Amino acid sequence: MQEEVSLATPFDLRLSRRLFSLVLPWWPYVLLAVACLLLNSVLQILGPLLTKIAIDRYLAPVPSSTLPWLEQRLPPAPVAGIASISLIYLATLVLGFLLDFSQQMLMQWTGQQAMFSLRRRILQHLHELELRFFDSNPVGRLVTRVTSDVDALNELFASGLVSLLGDALVVAFILAAMLRLSPPLTLLMVFALPAVFLVTVLFRRAVQSSNRRIRAAVARINSFLQEHVSGIAVLQLYNREARAARDFAGVNAAHRDAYFDAIRAYGWFYPSVEFISVVTIASLLVAGGWQVRSSALSLGILIAFFQYAMRLFRPIQDLSERYNILQAALAAAERIFQLLDTRPAILPPPAPRPFPSSTAPIEFDRVWFAYKDEEWVLRDVSFIIHPGEVIAVVGHTGAGKTTLTNLLLRFYDVQRGAIRIGGIDLREFDPRDLRRRFGVVLQDPTLFTGTIADNIRLGSSHVTDDAIHLAAEQVNLLDFVEDLPARFEHPVRERGAGLSTGQKQLISFARALAHDPVYLILDEATSSVDTETELRVREALENMVEGRTSIIIAHRLSTIQRAHRIFVMHKGQLRETGTHQELLALRGIYWKLYQLQYKDQEIRR
């Protein structure tokens, strides 16, 4: 999680340009919001000027030329003149409200559109990354990218980006108006600004440090919750609730303490700016009052200065807050762009080769592979699987069985050697085209929120309702589905909650069969089901493997005895090959595995 802290950089022009490019597709709306903001900033300085005109023209008359074009059109009578100025003031307030509302709505809409596109872009990019990337990046960190980090950008676009410009414009316009009314009093105001900026810089540093720790703590909380909610059954089984609660308390305390530091920073920042503003206004009262008594300054100008002074410090406070939003957004953007800039290691070639139109042999040619450095999981593995052949792969845990299928599906690329289908190296195919030809059933069935039909079809438009019905019938799932009130439209909750392991596995079988794959991979597909379900699945296997090149990875040797050939993997090497009877006759590794399972079954009996 050190990355969550370290990627909080000072202002970066290159990163800022890339960040602001996210809203370029909606630039007309941004320009319209800027126009509304500009007009509203101008209206901010009209109120005190109208107050000044009302006082200097009607209440304490003195010569004035602040807004001559307006003063020439005002009635001479005090009551009518003040009423006219009040109506103009009210009109500026209403117009300012409408402009502020329009600007907020436009930027909120633009921010949501940009974040919708960004989230979709991140998810699409995650789908393109290879499994090796997810091996080294916790799920909680990736969830933080799509949630908290995108929210930080949304806050910038919705309430920080244009408002930052608006606050700067208001400060500039107010100082310009004050300078025109009274340069000496404006100079007095300017003397107070360094103190405000010093407090702002100290506040920004304190909050920036707290925000870094808050982001790191949020990422840790997401990772902790994802891990412990996913493993809730094991947690309860081993009575680790109290220990998990204590561990989470530590993570949560880091988040709380970071927020407390931010709260303390806000606690002293706003009173400090308020104190400076009150002292400055009191100084204006002394200096301005003396000038009014000596007739060097009109009462209207003094009151207008009071109004401007109160309006000047608010946008300065907001500027500091907007700057913090900008800094948080830049840090979030750096992490998001770092993710988006992560190039997938497995890409389609510039000119992909067409996949063989008919079932072709699969060849592993002196394949070496390691997940990390040179800690080889596969060592010089070579074999050929002929079209229509049913191959079983057995071996101890860690022998490299699942790695064979991961390489065949090109979730990883080999370090040495080659894998070919129809004599063509896998790396010459488009990975999506390659994987489309395979049906895969894993040991742990994965179901998604939706319906049973949705989980069998899995978004493939070519899988018809008839194909779903036929697949369910062939894998002995149909009886279970027919008993449900909604049948194939029966809702499936997250991770298939409410369904038994066997039912979820049968749905996975139906999914593989409904897509009518050319090649079939069953990775420990029967290891997590009961004996009765295994018998039903074994019957379904005969339908599934018929006419297909199939690879069956299994610990239960009873499920693979009818395979055409059995590959025995041991410590990353292919040690034995043959039929069930041939391997028993060798009295080697397979014979020992068979004897162990046979003795285990005898003990159970």
Image: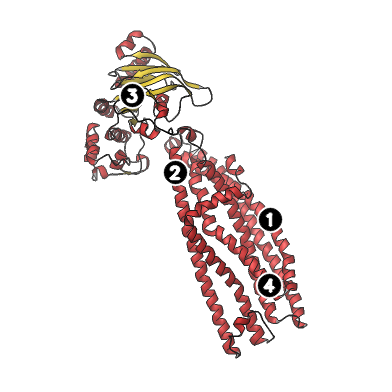
- CA gap between label 2 and label 4 equals 52 Å
CA neighbours of label 4 inside 10 A, class few (<14), some (14 to 19), many (20+): many
Give the labeled residue for mark 3: 552
Q: Which residue is located at x 63 percent, y 52 percent? A: 207
- CA gap between label 3 and label 1 equals 65 Å
CA neighbours of label 2 inside 10 A, class few (<14), some (14 to 19), many (20+): few
Question: Quarter of the image containing the N terminus?
Answer: top right
- Which one is in front in this view, the residue at disc 2 or the one at disc 4? 4
Q: Which mark is residue 178?
A: 4
- CA gap between label 1 and label 4 equals 25 Å
- Which one is in front in this view, the residue at disc 1 or the one at disc 4? 4
Give SS at disc 2: helix
Give the labeled residue for mark 1: 201
Name the colouring of the figure: secondary structure
Q: Earlier in the sequence, mark 3 or mark 1?
A: 1
- CA gap between label 4 and label 3 equals 83 Å
Give the labeled residue for mark 2: 123
Q: Earlier in the sequence, mark 4 or mark 3?
A: 4
Relative horizontal placement of residue 390, taking residue 290 as reference (left or right): left
Q: Amino acid at mark 4?
A: Met
Q: Amino acid at mark 3?
A: Ile
Give SS at disc 1: helix
Relative horizontal placement of residue 494, taking residue 483 as reference (left or right): right
Residues marked 4 and 3 touching at CB (< 8 Å):
no
